[in-house]
């Protein structure tokens, strides 16, 4: 029997018949694998797996297919398959990357037989391919390859231009391979990276073309005839010898019409007829993406995960961490490959944490790679040393910018001593041409940006520059000017306009502050930047960061500040503490100091801000009447200043204070009046007082509606507030809508599942932006969900939560969640000691001032007390108080408790009559936990008495 060509068919007719793949030959019947003729030890099960991958001819083989086929239907764990894959990779050694893991799907062998040639033995192509065979799949370059084909069809010279490590060589090789598959092109490769002498350029290219030299006669004789085959020459890594290479290419194009050239370089060759294709980094997923399927659609994420999976079989993917790595490395393929190699030892979180020392971290390059690609530092070093002196100086100075910058910023920071206005533009253009600087023309003014890896490298170089302090001083002065403009624009621009104009500067604000408060910095510049930076903390919900920076500055330099600077810093600190921590004494002191300075210096805006801040502190700390006084003072100041927006805000917060003082109808009137003003008017700065006032108004209106018994309206308004807040993309506003509106209404309703759904979004937004008060609120809601579900919260955890609540100044009577926790613990006979610090505050009868939920707190005290104490709590009196307040929902809950406690003697009881009256006022479509319990009590009292 004649042996079949293994490239033609994978069927095995003889025991010693085998199939080649690269350097390897597999004999499936003999269960043998060889490399370059030498036998490799591999277990029988692993050989069966490898044979399936070979037969698939480069196609994906799913995990299910492998398990079903190799294990013959036996039930085995997936880790058995992973163990075999590890054995195969160990056997392949340096070629282990031939096995590619398709995350969550299966595996494929990255080698494909030339079946086309085998099917047509008589039609051999005149292809001489000296290209290296890639052992890994090129990811995420489908669009680029398609565009390259379109350009190459129109030109004889195409140059792929891009920064070091962006994947120019790999893309060029893939493109050339596709070209060879589609057309009868001879493919040649001239690798120039190892050539250092310009005199060696022409001989090297001639050697790649298999001709004696690049003399015109030799070119024409070997390549120029009409019968000569078409040849595509890839000239890789041209940037360091671009002049000599350009001359050689021009000779080829002039004397050989059959030749086409594909070059790669960090800058164009600038030859006539040259088509330039700029290859950018791989697309990275948004940082807020959590779904791995969606993240894998972004090439940078796919590359990182695929390469990391090849090194670690049990890799666990944290989407947020992996996305952050992709962003920190700018989607640069080389950097991602090097990072992936470190994940097996450091884990993803470890790699992310180490990226500040990226040049020491990313040194795991392949030993077979070109020297300039073995580490990230080598790649950037290569690019940097190709620059002339002026370009190197410019790169070092530009690296101080963390955010995109324009020509004006460059002139102010990098070239202030150069009188020629075009000097900076010229050097910037050269750096863009050399792919070391990214240019964005989509904005009103041209914007430039350094890749993070190049910027880190430049910062290292800058540290050795004798001019570093003067450069940083100019940089901080420039950022101060920009921050002052942002502060002024905050008063007039719309939120969207302000964000699009100024928000991107935040990283530079941080950079300037870090330097200004360092040993060699300029404290006065730093405090001036802080005084202007409030719009950044508010707009971007960075209150935790604001608090730390300002607290540190005031502690160190308070005596050196001018009054207007201290006033601005105290106001910013009050805002930050209010949201990042809570209504603490420190927050109150900051606002009181800011108010005093504002009065002395006649600063009307700071007076308004301080009154708002003091209102918030008093409200959350349980001083509801004091909060009302601050709201009234704010209204007075606003009317004196003819500030209609501030007056509308003052009415809104006065309404909230009335709600918390138990006057719910007046609260509704004031909040709705404020909302009507915002319906008609659209103030330019919607976060002037820390969050969107319309959303805040709706959030508090929803809870007020619930107390008044307008249950369905409460749910609708709360949902609308969350929807509007989500569209605004402002964390503080969203937290307010979730916590004060939707979570509170759901909690008041006793809707455990709805609170559970909503609190997850609240916690995520709060923690992402350092909003400690909202985070504490979320923890209270989560404890409520757990305990209302019948599960105890561990005593230590509950005690820690209560300690945090007290430390934050969060008064227990601000929310009924705390009384619900006590009731749940009592109902289930759990230890109530962790709640002891708040028990007395909640249960005390003679509170100093009225509270929005006094009837509910007294009802809870009645249910929690032993009979000898309970008899002194007059629930009928509390019912009357609730009805006077028009607090329908409190009245209903009290009535339920009364009905449940009254003896059943078959007669119509007073509580039954009141319950009937209350239910008659409720529309039939209104539902909810307590309404359903009340209806059930009327129908079947014995069966429902124990529900509340």
Image (cartoon, rainbow, N blue to C red):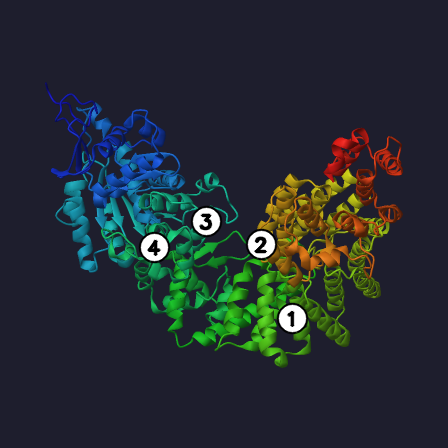
Left or right placement of residue 668 versus residue 164 in this view: right
Residue name at image x 62 percent, y 63 percent: 486
Label 1 CA crowd tier, 10 Å (few <14, some 14–19, many 20+): many
Residue topped by disc 2 = 797
> Secondary structure under badge 3?
helix
Which residue is nearer to you in this view: 40 or 357? 40
- Tag 2's secondary structure? helix
Spatial CA span between label 1 and label 4 = 44 Å
Residue contact at pointers 3 and 1, CB within 8 angstroms: no
Determine crowd level at label 4: few under 14, some 14-19, many 20+ residues with C-alpha closer than 10 A.
many
How many callouts does the rendering have?
4
Between discs 2 and 1, the one toward the N terminus: 1
Residues at marks 3 and 1, CA–CA distance in whole angstroms: 35 Å
Residue at the disc numbered 3 = 323
Furthest residue in direction front, as rendered: 868
Residue 642's image quarter?
A: bottom right
């Amino acid at each position: 029997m004649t042996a079949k060509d293994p490239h033609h068919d994978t069927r095995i007719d003889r025991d010693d018949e085998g199939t080649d793949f690269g350097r390897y030959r597999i004999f499936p019947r003999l269960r043998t694998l060889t490399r370059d003729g030498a036998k490799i030890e591999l277990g029988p099960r692993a050989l069966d797996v490898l044979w399936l991958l070979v037969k698939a001819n480069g196609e994906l083989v799913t995990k299910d297919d492998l398990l079903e086929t190799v294990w013959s239907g036996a039930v085995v764990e997936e880790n058995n398959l992973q163990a075999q894959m590890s054995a195969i990779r160990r056997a392949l050694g340096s070629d282990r990357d031939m096995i590619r893991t398709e995350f969550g799907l299966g595996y494929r062998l990255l080698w494909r037989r030339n079946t086309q040639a085998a099917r047509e033995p008589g039609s051999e192509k005149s292809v001489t391919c000296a290209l290296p065979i890639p052992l890994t799949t090129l990811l995420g370059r489908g669009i680029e390859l398609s565009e390259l084909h379109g350009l190459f069809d129109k030109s004889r010279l195409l140059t792929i231009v891009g920064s070091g490590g962006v994947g120019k060589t790999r893309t060029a090789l893939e493109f050339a391979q596709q070209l060879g598959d589609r057309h009868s092109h001879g493919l040649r490769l001239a690798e120039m990276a190892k050539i250092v002498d310009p005199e060696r350029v022409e001989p090297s290219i001639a050697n790649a073309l298999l001709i004696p030299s690049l003399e015109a006669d030799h070119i024409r004789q070997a390549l120029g005839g009409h019968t000569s085959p078409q040849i595509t020459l890839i000239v890789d890594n041209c940037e360091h010898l671009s002049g000599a290479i350009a001359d050689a290419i021009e000779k080829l194009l002039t004397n050989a019409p059959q030749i086409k050239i594909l070059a790669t370089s960090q800058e164009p060759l600038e030859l006539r007829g040259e088509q330039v294709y700029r290859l950018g980094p791989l697309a990275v997923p948004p940082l807020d993406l959590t779904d791995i399927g969606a993240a894998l659609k972004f090439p940078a994420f796919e590359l990182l995960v695929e390469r990391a999976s090849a090194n670690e079989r049990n890799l666990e993917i944290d989407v947020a961490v992996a996305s952050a790595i992709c962003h920190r490395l700018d989607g640069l393929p080389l950097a991602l490959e090097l990072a992936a190699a470190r994940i097996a030892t450091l884990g993803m979180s470890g790699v992310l944490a180490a990226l500040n020392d990226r040049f020491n971290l990313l040194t795991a390059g392949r030993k077979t790679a070109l020297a300039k690609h073995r580490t990230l530092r080598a790649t950037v070093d290569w690019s940097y040393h190709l620059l002339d002196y002026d370009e190197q100086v410019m790169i070092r100075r530009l690296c101080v910018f963390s955010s995109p910058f324009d020509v004006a910023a460059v002139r102010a920071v990098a070239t202030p001593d150069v009188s020629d206005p075009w000097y900076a533009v010229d050097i910037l253009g050269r750096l863009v041409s050399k792919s070391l600087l990214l240019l964005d023309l989509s904005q009103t003014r041209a914007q430039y940006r350094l890749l993070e890896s190049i910027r880190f490298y430049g910062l290292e170089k800058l540290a050795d520059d004798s001019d570093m302090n003067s450069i940083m001083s100019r940089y901080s002065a420039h950022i101060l000017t920009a921050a002052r403009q942002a502060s002024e624009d905050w008063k007039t621009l719309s939120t969207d306009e302000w964000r699009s104009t100024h928000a991107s500067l935040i990283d530079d604000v941080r950079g300037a502050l870090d330097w200004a408060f360092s040993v060699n910095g300029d404290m006065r510049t730093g405090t001036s930047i802080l005084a202007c930076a409030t719009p950044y903390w508010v707009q971007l919900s960075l209150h935790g960061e604001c608090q730390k920076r300002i607290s540190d500055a005031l502690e160190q330099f308070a005596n050196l500040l001018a009054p207007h600077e201290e006033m601005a810093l105290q106001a910013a600190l009050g805002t930050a503490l209010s949201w990042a921590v809570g209504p603490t004494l420190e927050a109150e002191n900051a606002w009181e100091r800011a108010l005093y300075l504002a009065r002395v210096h006649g600063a009307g805006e700071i007076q308004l801000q301080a009154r708002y801040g003091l209102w918030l502190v008093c409200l959350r700390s349980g001083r509801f009447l004091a909060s009302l006084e601050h709201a009234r003072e704010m209204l007075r100041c606003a009317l004196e200043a003819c500030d209609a927006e501030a007056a509308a805000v003052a009415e809104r917060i006065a309404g909230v204070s009335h709600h918390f003082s138990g006057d719910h109808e007046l609260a509704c009137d004031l909040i709705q009046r404020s909302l009507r003003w915002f319906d008609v008017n659209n103030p330019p700065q919607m976060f002037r007082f820390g969050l969107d006032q319309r959303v805040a108004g709706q959030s508090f209106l929803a809870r007020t509606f619930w107390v008044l018994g307008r249950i369905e309206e409460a749910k609708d308004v709360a949902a609308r507030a969350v929807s509007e807040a989500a569209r605004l993309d402002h964390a503080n506003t969203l937290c307010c809508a979730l916590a004060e509106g939707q979570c509170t209404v759901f909690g008041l309703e006793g809707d455990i599942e709805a609170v559970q759904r909503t609190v997850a979004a609240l916690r995520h937004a709060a923690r992402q932006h350092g909003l400690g008060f909202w985070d504490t609120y979320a923890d209270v809601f989560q404890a409520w969900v757990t305990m209302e579900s019948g599960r105890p919260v561990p005593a230590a955890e509950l005690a820690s939560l209560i300690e945090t609540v007290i430390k934050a100044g969060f008064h227990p009577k601000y929310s009924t969640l705390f009384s619900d926790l006590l009731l749940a613990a009592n109902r289930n006979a759990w230890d109530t000691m962790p709640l002891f610090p708040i028990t007395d505050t909640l249960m005390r009868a003679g509170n100093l001032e009225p509270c929005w939920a006094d009837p509910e707190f007294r009802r809870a005290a009645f249910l929690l007390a032993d009979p000898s104490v309970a008899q002194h709590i007059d629930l009928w009196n509390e019912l009357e108080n609730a009805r006077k307040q028009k607090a329908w929902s409190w009245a209903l809950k009290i009535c339920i408790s009364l009905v449940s406690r009254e003896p059943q003697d078959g007669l119509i009881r007073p509580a039954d009559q009141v319950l009937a009256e209350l239910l008659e006022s409720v529309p039939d479509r209104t539902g909810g936990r307590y309404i359903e319990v009340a209806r059930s009590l009327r129908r079947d009292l014995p069966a429902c008495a124990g529900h509340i």
